[in-house]
Image (cartoon, rainbow, N blue to C red):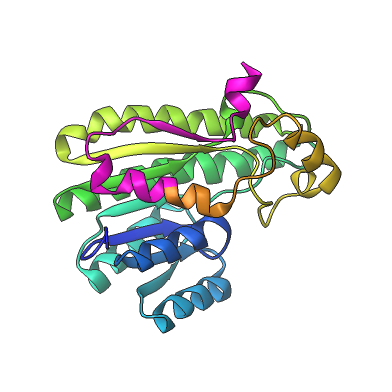
Amino acid sequence: MRFKDKTVFVTGAAGGIGEVTARMFAAEGARVVLADLLEDEGVAVTQAINETGGDASFVKLDVSSETDWRHAIASAEKVFGAVHVVVSNAGISGMVPDHENVDYMDRLTSVHIRGTFLAIRHGAKAIVRAGGGSIVTVSSVAAYCGLPGLHMGYAAVKAGVLGMTRCAAGEYARSGVRVNAIVPGLLPPMRTSVVSADPAMRKKFFETVPLGGTGGREDAANAILFLASDAAAYVTGAEVLLDGGFLAYRC
């Protein structure tokens, strides 16, 4: 029970990596706050965790809204007393048909850049109040290389997530806050995926992955739990690749 007596705040927890991560933290003894814009889905996951012996609460959150962040963190502290870990996972896909769409560029920036910035800004303050802990952000292999069908803005925002992670790791280290990132490759499609949900595209991509096939959401969640745990107490500013060797082979 690595996270007994700890409170973990997970964004984008109504599905995908966020849901799996929230469930795994709960199984490891954590009190979990699930945050998402999708209220019905988020409440359903929260109820499922509680029905299986976990301790979870849901809060509706638009990660691009500072007002929502203030409310969400305050709610988490009111319900569970403190926040020790923040997982900034909420995101939208970069694999869309029009890779030059300007409106989508704005959405990517709002969710991934502003959302991650606010997660670190408000998460770090809460973690300092709790006496120390960890923030984990979610980037992508797109931060390092271009991919067919990838919106240019997605590459930019995911590189930006890594930049903020490195900067925050240095800024908050002496305050007892570690900040690290996971860097997934092509995992199971997101709710907003279009191009990357196409079986033919996925088959072609996986031919370039040394380990073959696709990683699972559990692989991402396992890395997040490690970075948030005491086993990673001397790890900050790190980027953990979860790409089956794709980037190593590509370089």
Quarter of the view holding residue 46: bottom left
**Image position of 218 with respect to 35: above or below:** above
> Where residue 246 appears, x then y in whole percent?
63, 28
In which quadrant is the C terminus drawn?
A: top right
Left or right, 44 with respect to 188, comes to: left
Left or right, 171 with respect to 243, comes to: left
Q: Work out whether residue 97 can be spotted.
A: no
Left or right, 60 with respect to 96, comes to: left
* Of residues 76 and 243, the one drawn nearer to the viewer in this rendering: 243
> Where residue 8 appears, x then y in whole percent?
32, 59
**Image position of 100 with respect to 87: above or below:** above
Quarter of the view holding residue 77: bottom left
Which residue: 65% across, 30% down? 210
Which residue: 49% across, 76% down? 43
Q: Residue furthest top?
A: 251
In which quadrant is the N terminus drawn?
A: bottom left
Which residue: 41% across, 40% down? 117
Instruction: Please check the rendered image and state whether residue 249 is part of the magenta-colored stretch, yes or no.
Output: yes
The range drawn in magenta is: 223-251
Q: Work out whether residue 133 can be spotted.
A: yes
**Image position of 195 with respect to 173: above or below:** below
* Of residues 49 and 143, the one drawn nearer to the viewer in this rendering: 49
Instruction: Please check the rendered image and state whether residue 26 is part of the magenta-colored stretch, yes or no.
Output: no
Quarter of the view holding residue 121: top left
Which residue: 30% across, 65% down? 30
**Image position of 181 with respect to 63: above or below:** above
